[in-house]
Image (cartoon, rainbow, N blue to C red):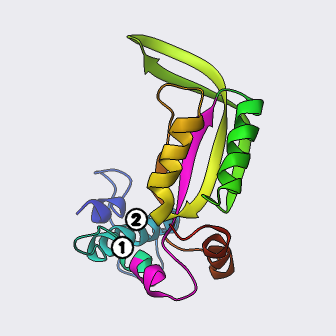
Amino acid sequence: MALLSLLRFPSASASPPPYSHRRNTATTALLRRRAPLVGALWVLSLGTFTTLACRTGSRGRTLHSTAMASASTTVPSIVVYVTVPNKEAGKKLSESIIKERLAACVNRVPGIESVYWWDGKVQSDAEELLIIKTRESLLNALTEHVKANHEYDLPEVIALPIKGGNEKYLEWIKNSTRDE
C-alpha cells in the first residue's frame, strides 16, 4: 500500500489525467520522478527477502558463507576491528599478529576519534583503528593474543563476517594464515 501511495497525484484536489491519447505533463513528470524511487524500494525489499530466506540452521551462516566453507580454495573469513591508543601500539600489535600468522593483513587507520561511555561518563580519545583480515577459525586465538599484548584493560575486538569478494584474495587469506 505504501508503494501505491507514492504514485498518487500531488494533492487530493488534483484530478487524474484525462482518458485521451495525451497525458497531463505534470502527472507524467511526477511519475518519472517517482519511478526510480519505487524501483529502488522494490530492489531493497528483494534484498531483505533474500537475506531472510538464505539463513541456515545451527551455525547461523548464510548460504554464501557456507559455500565459501565447502570450497577447497577458501575458508570462512572475517574482518576484525581493534582500536589502539597510538601509532606505536598499532605498529607493535599489527606486527605481532602477522608474525604469529593470526591474520593475513592488518590495515592501520590513523586519526580516528572514539567517543564512548566509560566510568560513568562520556569519554573521547584519539586512537588508531586496526582492520584485520583472517580466518573465522582463528578468532579466539586472535582475541587472546590482542588481550595479552594490548595496553587497554578492555580492548575492542569485534569480528564481522566476509560474505564474499575476490576469490583470489580470499584464497590468499587462507594461505597466509595458520590452520588453527
Give the amino acid at mark 1.
Thr
* Residue at disc 1, secondary structure: loop
Q: Quadrant of the N terminus?
A: bottom left
Report if residue 70 lies within the magenta region: yes
Q: Residue at x 59, y 67 (%)?
A: 178
As drawn, the label of residue 102 is none
The mark that comes first in sequence, 2 or 1, is 2
Report if residue 162 lies within the magenta region: no
Q: Can residue 34 be seen in this view?
A: no
Residue pointed to by mark 2: 41
Residue pointed to by mark 1: 62
Q: Distance between the residues labelled 2 and 1?
A: 23 Å
Q: Quadrant of residue 133?
A: bottom right
Determine whether, in the image, residue 63 is placed left or right of residue 135: left
Percent of width and height locating residue 20: 40, 82
Percent of width and height locating residue 159: 47, 52
Give the amino acid at mark 2.
Leu
Determine whether, in the image, residue 72 is placed left or right of residue 3: right
* Residue at disc 2, secondary structure: helix
Q: Write down the region rendered in magenta.
A: 66-84
Residue 92 position (above or below residue 34): above
- The reply to whether dot 2 and dot 1 touch (C-beta < 8 Å) is no
Q: Which residue is drawn at 42% across and 72% down?
A: 43
Nearer to us in this view, 147 or 26: 147
Label 2 or label 1, whichever lies nearer to me, is 1
Percent of width and height locating residue 18: 36, 73
Q: Residue at x 63, y 49 (%)?
A: 131
